[in-house]
Image (cartoon, rainbow, N blue to C red):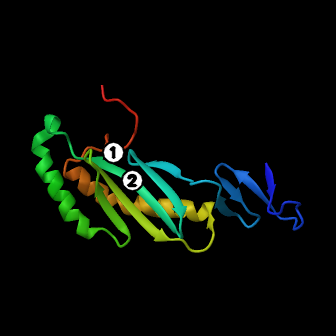
């Protein structure tokens, strides 16, 4: 589907609709609604969004084990979160959600128009930068299974 920037196509410029985006001739993306690109890294659900002059990336990094499952791991897992929070890069945030899932979030300034290449580049950089933090969470006993794969039932 091709949409004109102008009601009567006076300027001759067109944009192509691709998913939640309008793609301009120069390749820049304009969201038609709040877009999100979802991907998986090391078995965890990740998401990339952009608006308000920034690109935001999140990962469900893991979860503190339930007391009924592995009570002995919980104190060390909470301690690891406390130790890790000050070590996060600038623009990153560690959040402990009410259900004890752990989310890592990063926000970086958007420079100009967002292209698909720039968005994928940001996603790859985020995923690679995650590795040492995911390693720390795993070594502290955080369960990755509850961190990703939303909607799956443990049987």
Residue receiving disc 2: 59
Q: Position of residue 96 (x, y in %)?
A: 27, 54
Q: Using residue 132 as the reference point, say whether residue 10 is left or right of it.
A: right
Residue receiving disc 1: 147
Q: In the image shown, does 43 or 113 lie closer to the viewer? A: 113
Label 2: which secondary element: strand
Q: In the image shown, does 120 or 102 lie closer to the viewer? A: 102
Label 1: which secondary element: loop
Q: Which mark is residue 103?
A: none
Q: Position of residue 127 (x, y in %)?
A: 42, 58
Q: Quadrant of residue 145?
A: top left
Q: Give the crowd class for mark 1: few <14, some 14-19, many >=20 residues within 10 Å.
A: many
Q: Does residue 18 sit above or below 87 in this rendering?
A: above
Q: Does residue 60 sit above or below 89 in this rendering?
A: above
Marks 2/1 in contact by CB < 8 Å: the verdict is yes
Q: Give the crowd class for mark 2: few <14, some 14-19, many >=20 residues within 10 Å.
A: many
Residue occupying the point 46% across, 70% down:
108
For marks 2 and 1 on the same chain, the one whose residue lies earlier in the sequence: 2
Q: Position of residue 79 (x, y in %)?
A: 15, 57
Q: CA distance from mark 2 to mark 1?
A: 8 Å
Q: Position of residue 83 (x, y in %)?
A: 18, 64
């Amino acid at each position: 589907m091709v949409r004109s920037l102008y009601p009567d196509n006076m300027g001759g410029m067109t944009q192509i609709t691709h998913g939640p985006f309008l793609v301009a001739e120069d390749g820049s993306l304009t969201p038609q609604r709040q877009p999100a690109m979802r991907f998986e890294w090391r078995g965890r659900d990740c998401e990339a969004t952009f608006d308000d002059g920034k690109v935001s990336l999140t990962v469900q990094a893991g979860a503190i084990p339930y007391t009924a499952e592995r009570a002995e791991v919980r104190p060390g897992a909470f301690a690891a979160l406390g130790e890790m929070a000050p070590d996060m890069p600038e623009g990153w945030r560690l959040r402990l959600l009410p259900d004890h899932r752990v989310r890592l979030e990063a926000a970086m300034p958007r420079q100009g128009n967002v292209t698909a290449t720039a968005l994928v580049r940001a996603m790859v950089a985020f995923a690679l930068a995650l590795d040492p933090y995911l390693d720390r969470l795993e070594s502290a006993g955080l369960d990755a299974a509850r961190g990703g794969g939303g909607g799956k039932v443990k049987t």
